[in-house]
Image (spheres, grey):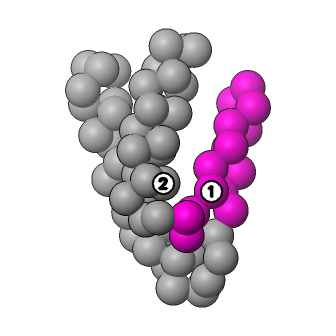
């Protein structure tokens, strides 16, 4: 499981760079925290999180 979460962390790091400081992400064990500055940012995370998560799962063939 840690290997999967590491891949997810790498994906989230790339994602947070793309949105230039509008999104923060922290993971401790199996808990995830998103820091979102705006309401539109929260809607964007809600709409796009699943696709990023599925991308990692598919790449790892889980």
For disc 2, the neighbor class at 10 Å (few under 14, some 14 to 19, many from 20) is some
Determine if the magenta segment contains residue 6.
no
Q: Element at badge 1?
A: strand
SS under mark 2: helix
Residue at (49%, 13%) from the top-left corner?
A: 3
User: Can you give x and y, in whole percent of width and height, for residue 2 in the image?
Assistant: 57, 14
Residue at point 26%, 20% (across, down): 61
Could you classify mark 1 by the number of other residues whose Cα lies within 10 Å: few (under 14), some (14-19), or many (20 or more)? some
Name the residue at 51% across, 22% down: 6
Are the residues at dot 1 and dot 2 in contact (C-beta closer than 8 Å)?
Answer: yes
For residue 16, which numbered disc appears in the image? Answer: 2
In magenta, the rendered stretch is 21-35
As drawn, the residue found furthest toward the bottom would be 39
Quadrant of the frame with the C terminus: top left
Prevalent SS, magenta region: strand
Asked if residue 61 shows in the view, the reply is yes
Q: Please name the residue that numbered disc 1 is placed on.
A: 24
* Residue 50 visible in this rendered orientation of the protein: no
**Whether residue 9 is situated above or below residue 18 in the rendered picture:** above
């Amino acid at each position: 499981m840690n290997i999967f979460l590491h891949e997810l962390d790498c994906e989230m790091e790339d994602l947070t760079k793309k949105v230039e400081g509008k999104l923060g992400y922290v993971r401790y064990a199996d808990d995830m925290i998103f820091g979102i500055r705006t309401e539109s940012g929260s809607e964007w995370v809600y709409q796009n999180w699943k696709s990023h998560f599925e991308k990692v799962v598919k790449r790892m063939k889980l």
